[in-house]
Image (cartoon, helix red, strand yellow):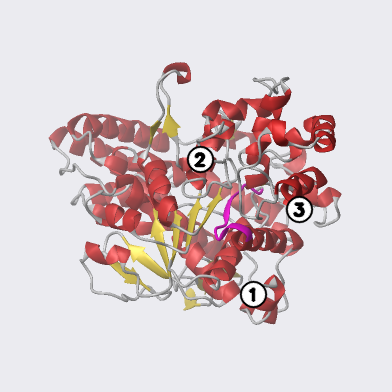
Amino acid sequence: MPVDAVLAERPIYKGGQILRSWQKRFVQTCVEDWRLHGKARYLIADDVGLGKTLSMAAAALVLSLLDDKPVLILAPATLIWQWQEELEDKLGVPAAVWSTQKKCWLDGERRPLTQKGDPSLAAKCPWRIGIMSTGLIVNGDDEGERGALAKKTFGVVILDEAHKARASRGMQGRDAAKPNNLLSFLRAVARNAASVILGTATPIQLDAVEMWDLLAALGQGAPQVLGTPFDGGEWMREESVRFLTGERPWPVNDTNRWGLFRNPLPPAAEDSVFRDIRNDARLSPREVMGPRFETLGPDIRTDFLEDFQTLAERHNPIVRRVVRRTRPMLEERGLLKRIGVIAHPRADDGLPTALFNGGGLEMSLAFKTAYEAAEGFSRLYAQRCPGAGFLKTILLRRIGSSAMAGLETTRRLLGRIDTALLPEEEIGDEGAPADTAPPDPQEILFLRDVERNLAAVVDGSDTDPKVQIVLHYLRERNWLETNGAIIFSQYRTTAEWVLEALCSEFPDEPVALYAGGTASFVQRGQERRTAPRELEHVSI
């Protein structure tokens, strides 16, 4: 199935854009794997900014045309709407999002597609493609939504931010690996899925064995990934990854060297050695178990041993199943234009030195006092409600984002603690709290101290230095006239607060807020109008 033919009528092509060459190559690689084995299994670890989401989305689209089973996309709560928009805007594919709060499926306008409050519908998406927060898997119930999904058969499963699926191994890795809920679920759902694609920019966070954990999950029900546990199965052992890190030397015994390629045996197209072996042994393209070393012809054995080092480095199962492109790599090959990056602040930026304390911003006394009081509240609340999930740290995170976000959260805490404390997409993978209670009298004292001091910052008797920095670059460094600016924030409250400050300072300039779904808008002065996601001619 030609990838270009499938995508030719999609919005991204009709709009004059195309998939970049490395994106098309990834989709084609998945299709070729599906043709060969009836299953596509890959981990894509491209650098941030290279269109990894679109690569996976396009692969899901094309693979879904080869199979009539449903598609499941798992992503952090902060990314589920981005996934829905990418599929709709770029590929013209509608996808439903599961609301963990409302217990129903939602369309792109965030309207219910199913009855609210029915967890059993999680495994019954009304549309072909369903998108879910990984928080549901991390904090779910094997007897509820998570369990129902694990038993379902999918045509394609995509896990974004896959590095969060991990196993703990105790001190110095001596204990037996204990997978977290996300990795356990991935192993279970992969057994019943045709194609599985994992996406992460950081496949290795602490140890190379973490990447092996992901590939072992990819290999569930797919022996072409790491082979079978029979007749050697060297790559089925986690210590095999040490070959690639240099912590474990490659075998010197000829039979043992061949054992690294016999199971799984690479496809004939990868090297003439594998082509000759397959032809000589009359193996079908789908067979992943090669012949024993002693049965190889003398010429084939000689060729293999002469090329062993190159074959081991380029055609081992881990290299073959991990797709990684970096920006420097693509720039060197002329596939990406080189972009000069200038990091700020610089010595000639003219920033007031009073705004800084070492390498960070100097926060006001009111802000510092508020943060210390928030630490006191969080400490007491965590001791009293150890199962409170994100509530134990959310106040500190929100204050760290902005005084306005912290103040909003403080006032909600002073009212009633529930899952409506944050929008669903901001809760994150900690999930909704399982053990909550209203703040007690001592905690309330801390919260009132937080509120009083943050209100001083927000109401103008004190100023958040983050806003001062933004205004300095836009006004004093003339960014408003030359470049404009894109400002990122995890929390919508912070984004709106900065927007209001910019609109107040530049009342004649349009300022846009992109919030996903139908929540995007453009504001000029005090006049606000809703806008489509494709915002154009906006200065800030």
Q: Is residue 254 magenta?
A: no
In the rendered image, the vertical position of residue 179 relative to residue 175, given as above or below: below
How far is the residue under mark 1 from the one under mark 3?
46 Å
Query: Looking at the image, is mark 1 or mark 3 nearer the viewer?
Result: 3
Q: Earlier in the sequence, mark 2 or mark 3?
A: 2
Which residue is depicted at the point 18% across and 51% down? 416
In the shown orientation, is residue 198 left or right of residue 270?
Answer: left
In the image, the segment drawn in magenta is 36-46
Q: Earlier in the sequence, mark 1 or mark 3?
A: 3
How far is the residue under mark 1 from the one under mark 2?
45 Å
Extreme-left residue of the structure: 441
Instruction: Tell me the quadrant of the picture where the N terminus can be found.
Output: bottom right
Residue where numbered disc 3 is placed? 269
| Labelled disc at residue 536 | 1
Which residue is depicted at the point 19% across and 39% down? 444
Residue 15 spot, x, y in % from top left: 68, 79
In the rendered image, the vertical position of residue 26 relative to residue 90, given as above or below: above
Note whether residue 125 is visible: yes
